[in-house]
Image (cartoon, grey):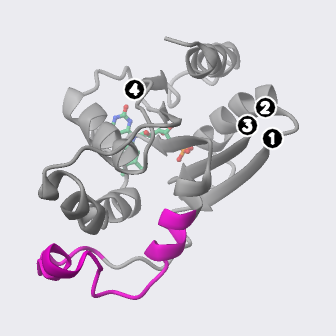
Amino acid sequence: MRISVLLCSPRKNGNTKRLINEFLKHFEGSSVDIIDSYSVNVSGCRGCDACKDTGVCVFNDDMCEIIKKLKKADMIVLAFPLYFDAMPAPMKMIIDRMQPLYNLTYGAGKRPEINKKGIALITAGSKAVRDYSLDNTCKYFLNLLGASFEGAFVVDRTDIDEGSDKFLNAAKAAVERVLSNR
Ligand SMILES: Cc1cc2nc3c(=O)[nH]c(=O)nc-3n(C[C@H](O)[C@H](O)[C@H](O)COP(=O)(O)O)c2cc1C
């Protein structure tokens, strides 16, 4: 299986990386590609609407390559720490740049074909009471890449308690979900 992880934590060996590592332990033998949102060169969408007519973005940066990689994957994992109840800005910049794909599908009255699974792995410093709009943001993004949204699996209270069981348990629950046939 080809797994693409879109990672968005500035802390290279932080809590989010720890959660991904636990998750990926269950997929030994799979090819894993980790895209570090903090290392890529992606400009923010400027809403110029050029892609409405052309289907192509005016920016020629790393976004094209990112979309190619994510589309090739059999499973897409979004992994990020909660920042002010949302994903950190670099991931949101990438998500906003999906506007050409949005225009080519929903904008043209079509729906994307869903043929792979997608999931979000999130860490949060305090007790996470997530806003559902965050789930919708993940879902819209994943759907445009042909992936379902199997849910967000959260390890919270990382700033209070570093216990390892919660990382193992969240990873296990996420794995069970993506491997289930529902
Ligand atoms: C700018 C910033 C904003 C944050 N906002 C939240 C928040 O809204 N809710 C929360 O529970 N934790 C918040 N945190 C804590 C992180 O989500 C938490 O420490 C996370 O586990 C860090 O993951 P990392 O080690 O991969 O960076 C915030 C941390 C930072 C630096």
Is residue 33 toward the left or the right of residue 105 in the image? right
Quick one: SS at disc 2? helix
Contact, CB < 8 Å: mark 2 with mark 3? no
Q: Residue at x 59, y 18 (%)?
A: 170
Quick one: SS at disc 3? helix
| Residue 39 on the magenta span | no
Q: Residue at x 34, y 40 (%)?
A: 138
The mark that comes first in sequence, 4 or 1, is 1
User: According to the image, label 3 marks what residue?
Assistant: 21
Residue 94 higher or lower than 78, as above or below: below
> Which label belongs to residue 8?
none
Residue type at the position of mark 1: Ser
Mark 3 or mark 4, which is nearer to you? 3
- The span shown in magenta is 44-68
The mark that comes first in sequence, 1 or 3, is 3
Residue type at the position of mark 2: Phe
The mark that comes first in sequence, 2 or 4, is 2
Residue type at the position of mark 3: Asn
Residue 177 higher or lower than 30, as above or below: above
User: According to the image, label 4 marks what residue?
Assistant: 126
Distance between mark 2 and mark 3 Cα atoms:
10 Å
Q: Residue at x 63, y 45 (%)?
A: 14
Is residue 102 toward the left or the right of residue 28 in the image? left
Is residue 182 toward the left or the right of residue 5 in the image? left
Distance between mark 1 and mark 3 Cα atoms:
13 Å
Contact, CB < 8 Å: mark 1 with mark 3? no
